[in-house]
Image: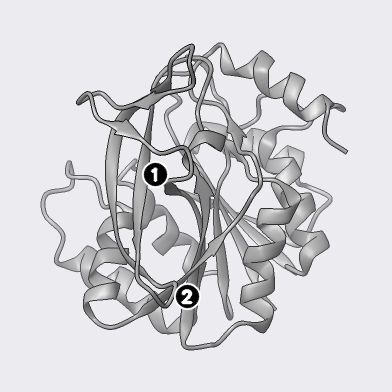
């Protein structure tokens, strides 16, 4: 059965305070609480949460009565691929990767877990969102724009910075380009088969200086170069998440209106 890996070891630099446990749900839930609920409901049987050392005690207390939730400490902030690599040591079978500060919606989580349970074991997957459903009212955001081939497989992702919509709904990036609202972007909701796990350790061993971030896009690009397939699952869900301080109230409002 699939295991959920939640990446909750970020520094929250732009947010200004630890956003991993920010209460935003109707009952004071953090976003990762909602993702855990959706993933377990969809069919995940265990979860691994990657946390910062200074947050370990708070997480341990929060999940003390949930033995299916395991915690892994990322002692150094070496990037998302490093965090996933640490968590994979606790995983048996397929892993579903998600950010701890994003709300994907139950439908998107169900698509990811559904592929993990029923999709081809030779295919990993990415749940891709429409760009206009991933923007923040608090300021510009960075998104990984996806290139998809005719068979629905991921060819590449390219990070685009400063994406925001103006008063007329026109989406532009920091370099002045305009973007179609339906452009597919990655929000780090991945399904990874066990065949990919050794590549994390291999690439990390050959990675550059420790100060250079070891990010998921590098692993995905290397995997595609080695003929791994990533099936792109398009979702109509609207994302919300915590990037800027002003996002918190917006997220609370959005979640209060959802079933």
Residue placed under numbered mark 2 in the picture: 124
User: How does the figure colour the protein chain or chains?
Assistant: one colour
Q: What residue appears at the point 24 percent right and 81 percent down from the top-left corner?
A: 226
173, 190: nearer the viewer: 173
The tag on residue 21 is: none
**Left or right, 59 with reference to 82:** right
Q: Is residue 190 above or below residue 35?
A: below
Q: What residue appears at the point 71 percent right and 32 percent down from the top-left corner?
A: 30
Q: Is residue 19 above or below residue 76?
A: above
* Residue 8, x across and y down, in percent: 53, 41
Name the quarter where the N terminus is drawn: bottom right
The tag on residue 75 is: 1
Q: Earlier in the sequence, mark 1 or mark 2?
A: 1
145, 167: nearer the viewer: 167
Residue, far front: 168
Closer to the camera: disc 1 or disc 2? 2
144, 102: nearer the viewer: 144
Residue 61 visible, this orientation:
yes
Say what secondary structure mark 1 lies in. Answer: loop
Q: Dot 1: few (<14), some (14–19), or many (≥20) neighbours within 10 Å? A: few
**Left or right, 77 with reference to 101:** left
Name the quarter where the C terminus is drawn: top right
How many numbered markers are drawn? 2
Q: Is residue 172 above or below residue 211?
A: above
Residue 28 visible, this orientation:
no
Say what secondary structure mark 2 lies in. Answer: strand
**Left or right, 131 with reference to 228:** right
Q: Dot 2: few (<14), some (14–19), or many (≥20) neighbours within 10 Å? A: many
């Amino acid at each position: 059965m699939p295991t959920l890996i939640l990446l909750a070891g970020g520094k929250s630099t732009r947010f200004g305070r630890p956003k991993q446990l920010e209460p935003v749900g109707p009952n004071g839930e953090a976003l990762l609480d909602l993702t855990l609920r959706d993933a377990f409901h969809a069919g995940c049987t265990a979860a691994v949460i990657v946390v910062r050392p200074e947050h370990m005690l708070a997480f341990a207390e929060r999940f003390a009565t949930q033995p299916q939730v395991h915690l892994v400490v990322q002692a150094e902030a070496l990037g998302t691929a490093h965090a996933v690599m640490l968590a994979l040591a606790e995983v048996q079978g397929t892993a579903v990767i998600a950010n701890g500060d994003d709300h994907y919606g139950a439908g998107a989580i169900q698509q990811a877990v559904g592929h993990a349970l029923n999709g081809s074991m030779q295919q990993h997957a990415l749940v891709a969102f429409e760009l206009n459903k991933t923007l923040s009212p608090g300021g510009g955001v960075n998104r990984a724009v996806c290139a998809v081939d005719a068979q629905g497989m991921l060819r590449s992702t390219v990070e685009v910075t400063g994406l925001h919509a103006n008063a007329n709904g026109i989406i532009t990036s920091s370099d002045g380009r305009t973007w179609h609202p339906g452009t597919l972007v990655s929000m780090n909701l991945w399904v990874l088969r066990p065949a990919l796990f050794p590549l994390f350790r291999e690439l990390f061993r050959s990675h550059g200086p420790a100060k250079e971030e070891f990010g998921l896009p590098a692993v995905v690009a290397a995997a595609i170069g080695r003929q791994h397939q990533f099936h792109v699952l398009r979702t109509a869900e609207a994302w919300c998440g915590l990037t800027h301080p002003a996002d918190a109230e917006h997220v609370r409002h959005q979640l209060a209106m959802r079933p």
